[in-house]
Image: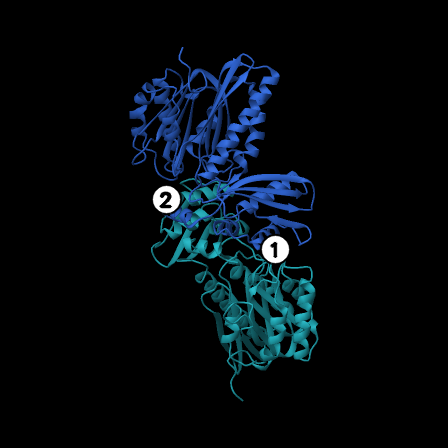
Chain colours: A blue, B cyan
Amino acid sequence: MKKSKIPEGFLLSGLHCGIKKKGYDLGLIFCRQPRKAVGLFTTNLNVSYSVSLCRRNIKNPIKAILVNSGNANCFSHKQGDKDTELITANLARALNTDKKNILFASTGIIGKKLPKEKIIKKIPQLVKELNDNPSKFAESILTTDTKAKVVSKTLILGKKKVKITGFAKGAGMIKPNLATMLSFILTDADIDLSLAKKRIKEIADISFNSINIDSAESTNDSLLLFSSRKVPLSGSQENKFFQCLEEVMLELAKMIVADAEGATKFIQLDVRGAKNKKEAKEIAHKIAGYTLFKCALYGSNPNLGRIVAVLGQAKIKVNRENLSVNFGSLKKKEVNVVIKMKRGKANWRVYTCDLSPEYVRINAEYN
Amino acid sequence: MKKSKIPEGFLLSGLHCGIKKKGYDLGLIFCRQPRKAVGLFTTNLNVSYSVSLCRRNIKNPIKAILVNSGNANCFSHKQGDKDTELITANLARALNTDKKNILFASTGIIGKKLPKEKIIKKIPQLVKELNDNPSKFAESILTTDTKAKVVSKTLILGKKKVKITGFAKGAGMIKPNLATMLSFILTDADIDLSLAKKRIKEIADISFNSINIDSAESTNDSLLLFSSRKVPLSGSQENKFFQCLEEVMLELAKMIVADAEGATKFIQLDVRGAKNKKEAKEIAHKIAGYTLFKCALYGSNPNLGRIVAVLGQAKIKVNRENLSVNFGSLKKKEVNVVIKMKRGKANWRVYTCDLSPEYVRINAEYN
């Protein structure tokens, strides 16, 4: 049997159906055996019809995840939910399953009707082209991203071998809360579902939830962990699996920041010496989301005043004795900014980028 | 007696002392009789030494307000408070008064030591040049502003005549909270102090507190209302005075937005049909502060999705039946965006501007 490039039990495809003017805009993840998946979704109250559908179906065994880019499938028309069900019903029929076993993820412009006929028409081809090469699927989920984001790892556990393949798209409207952007993590490791639910939240917190591009929480953020359960694991093997999952998710999260709209610098921002974890996290996100700090980074400008001002705005009183800021090598492409306070012992790390004139131009024209 | 161009009882001056490389950077407001002033200050917890001094002295009768631009006099060194007192003590001596009767306002870069010698050296000239022309003072308080902001009104009340002259500087780091930026309002109307304290908060709320350039609340925001009390007013005349004061403050606030860093559009943003005033105000400020909305405005792009997303992020659930957005004539320089919801009857109006690549450039280089 040929060795699969992706976790055992999965097949993928991606093609152009015409939502975007060019490039792949429709992708499919197929699991030979329906399996329960784990999903984290945006905390934005106005969500896409796709997220609503996922929330309804996530409790069921999942046979396939359909993804489109170029249209958020959100706030477009009264029949949005109905149209979404119609699309998944068509896919279910082609896969000989029920529509309740399908998940759907969308990304792109909000407020425009998803061209359902274009999608439905391409479903047979999408199903026919399913294979074990991740590249077309990885491309089909992108919007303003400049490159595909795939991380694959193989874990050798005694005589067993498990794979994790993670996909993500990011670029803009990135300030995660619980989950972020679109990310699909596939594996063949048979992990305990309730443990996976717990661990993925923890890992999301230090990866996808610790990136901040523009403080904007999307209507479509979805993170799905999907296992074909081909390879059973022991307890200690499960620990190793989750370590590996953490690496995959962290790498994907960093790839999103590195490919952020208009970004010229990747910033690792460490907040140290906060009163508690919650405070450390809040401070790190406030700074990472502060427009004037991001402008200063773009100018390689170690502007201490921006930190002092945003801390005060966040009701954190500092003085020259209890605050020190190390801007690292600001001229470089990858920068580590370290903010040390003397309030306590808690630390938090987030990943962010500068704000460039190019970001403004991209989003001025985005429609 | 020659007619004064500014309210009776005041004199002004402004000059270059060397904090900035060029242009006026030191200004003085002088009141012949020490009078109690009304002050509103930033809610940022990390404040300048100048704001701290104002908070200590605002309860005293005020003889003079010293203002410098080019340096925020904030978070610069251990002796910051001491140096500030030393400067005002020198001014007090030159004016034959006590240092507790002096207020001080600063604006500019945070974290750099204020060159006190340069200021002290120029105090004699600053005092000597006091006169009734507002233009040099108006210029001395600017930073990245491209123009001076002065509004003067004369109110005829029967046989009496009262004047109001307001000054402001703005440009960046503008997201007021209680008070904003630097603004000095002079008048000769003898208004009741406790009434003035109450009314100025209300008026600030619909003027300076309803502008949002970059959601950044400064360490130095100060609004001072200062009356020479030359002209006594009756109750109904007081009402007319406050109407006129509202016009002055609203005009100044709008001038700040129109001259915002890099702005190409002036946006009047109306939120209608919110549950209550608090909600209307919160929504208006969230939208006005949302980077992606401001980028869309720069691109004259009526991007409904940005509104839907930021409302959901603010936990306001909307659908196509209960939200309508009118983007007005987005191609124009002055735009009225109207957001109608069906949640209740409360409305709020804020003034904001677009986010342009030029804003990023200005703040990338600001040091």
Left or right? Give the position of B45 relative to B237: right
What's the residue type where badge 2 is placed?
Tyr
* Residue A209's disc number: none
From this view, report whether residue A137 is shown above or below residue A333: above
Cα separation between marks 1 and 2: 34 Å
In this orientation, does residue B74 appear? yes
Q: Which of these two is toward me, A304 or B359? A: A304
Mark 2 = which residue? A366
Label 2: chain letter: A
From this view, report whether residue A155 is shown above or below residue B195: above
Q: Which of these two is toward me, A213 or B237? A: A213
Badge 1 density bin: few <14, some 14–19, many ≥20, Cα 10 Å: many
What's the residue type where badge 1 is placed?
Asn
Identified at 43% across, 62% down, the residue is: B258
**Whole-percent x and y of residue A269?**
56, 42
SS type, badge 1: loop
Label 1: chain letter: B
**In the current view of this chain or complex, which residue is farthest to the top?**
A1
Badge 2 density bin: few <14, some 14–19, many ≥20, Cα 10 Å: some
Q: Which of these two is toward me, A115 or B29? A: B29
| For the residues bearing labels 1 and 2, Cβ distance under 8 angstroms | no
SS type, badge 2: loop
Image quarter for residue B1?
A: bottom right
**Whole-percent x and y of residue B199?**
58, 65
How many numbered circles does the render carry?
2
**Whole-percent x and y of residue B355?**
43, 53
Mark 1 = which residue? B44
Query: In this rendering, do the residues under marks 1 and 2 share a single chain?
Result: no
Q: Which of these two is toward me, B193 or A38? A: A38
Image quarter for residue A118?
A: top left
